[in-house]
Image (cartoon, rainbow, N blue to C red):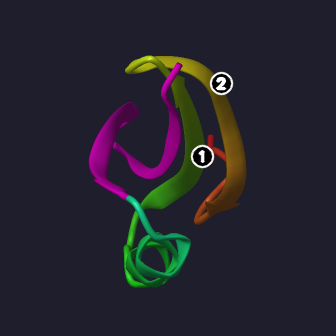
Amino acid sequence: MSNSHQYELWAQKKGQWGMVGSFREFEVASAVLRNYKYRTRLVRVAYENGAPVLKEVIAEVGATRQEP
């Protein structure tokens, strides 16, 4: 059984979420997150035998309130 994890950076642009990148190291993912200009989420993804088994949002930054 093979277990691993990575950090994914997701950004919201024009109401759509898209993955910006994936990183093995938290420090690298965190640095990219701090320099991104859109609403952004840092997600920890755990894998078992190459398949994702857990996705956990560990940080969200940027505008969280929608203006009317």
Q: Amino acid type of disc 2? A: Leu
Picture residue at 55% right of the left edge, 37% below the top: 45
- Marks 2/1 in contact by CB < 8 Å: the verdict is yes
Residue 68: percent from left, percent from top: 62, 40
| Magenta region includes residue 15 | yes
Q: How many marks?
A: 2
Among numbered discs 2 and 1, the one appearing first in the sequence: 1
> How many other residues sit within 10 Å of disc 2, few (<14), some (14-19) or many (≥20)?
few
Percent position of residue 14, x then y: 32, 40
Between 61 and 32, which is closer to the camera in this rendering? 32
Mark 2 — residue?
54
Please name whichever residue, 55 or 41, is drawn nearer the observer in this view of the structure: 55
Horizontal side of 43 relative to 25 (left or right) equals right
SS state under label 2: strand
Name the kind of residue labelled 1 in the image: Arg
Let me know if residue 9 is in the magenta part. Answer: yes
Magenta stretch?
A: 1-23
Judged by its main secondary structure, the magenta piece is strand
- Secondary structure, mark 1, is strand
Say which mark, if any, is on residue 44: 1
